[in-house]
Amino acid sequence: MTFFKRNNLLLGLALGICVPVALYGILLTIYDFMENQNLLANVSFSPTFRSRTLALVAICINLVLMRMFSRSYASDSMRGVVLATLVLVIIWVVRFASFLFQ
């Protein structure tokens, strides 16, 4: 738990980008495995539903990081996570704008 007591903007920024990207890869791998094992129903959603939803869930993991840094009073690290989250959300909106704002 002492890791989250470090108060550094770059640490928060790095964790705020790396953790969601890694989680997105893990979730995509799990989803592909479940699809290959025929554990998922074939429901017709929009073409980008899976990637859109998994990316949003991965971005939301930053809430856990924010809470951990908040509890440790590491405000600079928390600012880095918030900045990374803002960048990831902007990328998400730009990437899926054509599907979101039809």
Image (cartoon, rainbow, N blue to C red):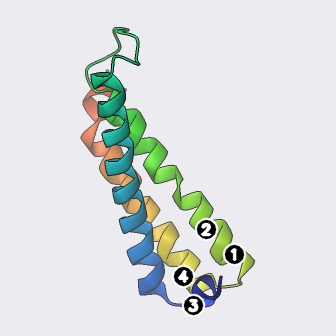
| Residue 8, image x, y percentages | 50, 90
Q: Which amino acid does label 4 sit on?
A: Ser
The crowd level at tag 3 (other Cα within 10 Å; few <14, some 14-19, many 20+) is some
Q: Do the residues labelled 2 and 3 touch (CB within 8 Å)?
A: no
Image quarter where the C terminus lies is: top left
Q: Do the residues labelled 1 and 2 touch (CB within 8 Å)?
A: yes
Q: Do the residues labelled 3 and 4 touch (CB within 8 Å)?
A: yes
Cα gap from disc 1 to disc 2, whole angstroms: 6 Å
| Labels 2 and 3: the sequence-earlier one | 3
| Labels 3 and 4: the sequence-earlier one | 3
Q: Which amino acid does label 1 sit on?
A: Ser
Quick one: which residue is furthest to the right in this view? 71
The residue carrying mark 4 is 77
Q: Which amino acid does label 3 sit on?
A: Asn
Image quarter where the N terminus lies is: bottom right
Q: Which amino acid does label 2 sit on?
A: Met
Relative horizontal placement of residue 69, taking residue 33 as reference (left or right): right
The residue carrying mark 1 is 70
| Labels 4 and 1: the sequence-earlier one | 1
At x 45%, y 83%, the residue is 11
The residue carrying mark 3 is 7
Q: Which mark is residue 101?
A: none
The residue carrying mark 2 is 66
* Residue 49 picture quarter: top left
The crowd level at tag 2 (other Cα within 10 Å; few <14, some 14-19, many 20+) is many
